[in-house]
Image (tube, grey):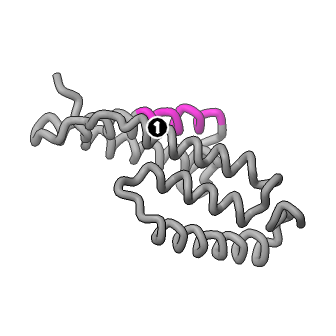
Amino acid sequence: MIVTKDTASGLIFVAAGALVVIEAQGHPMGTLLRMGPAFYPTLIGGLTIFVGAALIVRSFLKGSVPVPKIAWRELALLIGAILVAAVSLNRLGLVISTVLLVGISRLAVRPMHWVGTLVLAGVLAVVAVVIFWWFLQLPIPLWPWS
């Protein structure tokens, strides 16, 4: 049996939905008129299981594209970019860590265009400063010297 994208996605949906339903059972369910804290997670988990099961059935009836080979280089670059940004945030500031995040992430894209990368890094750095530093007023340094 060849594992297809739909089969793999369906299995992930079923597993995630089952985990949510199982975790929700530790809380009171309530009734339709007086819903308890487990009602909504159980409902969403059940719907997620249903969607996953539908994907699995569809993959057997209709067929689907096989799961592609994992792009290890790109995966490592993206995870590394997130780790570098997380570690450098307090040391280098929001602006430089955002630029590092974008720069390292863009190494995973082929072909990489430096002009587009610099524009994207600049725009995202400004957006990050406006949202996190100005609007939300999080105590994040903007620069290493601030």
Q: Where is residue 143 shown, x and y percent of the image?
A: 81, 65
Up-down: is 102 above or below 29?
below
> Which residue occupies 50% across, 38% down?
76
Secondary structure of the magenta portion, mostly? helix
Up-down: is 110 above or below 122?
above
| Residue farthest toward the right in the current orientation of the protein | 146
Q: Is residue 88 left or right of residue 115?
A: right
Quadrant for residue 8, please give it: top left
Q: Nearer the viewer, residue 22 or 127?
A: 127
Please name the amino acid that badge 1 sits on. Ala
Q: Where is residue 113 shown, x and y percent of the image?
A: 42, 64
Up-down: is 63 above or below 117?
above
Question: Which residue is identified by label 1?
Answer: 16
Mark 1, secondary structure of its residue: helix
> Which residue occupies 56% across, 59% down?
102
Is 25 a magenta residue? yes
Is 132 a magenta residue? no
Per the rendered image, the range of residues in magenta is 15-26
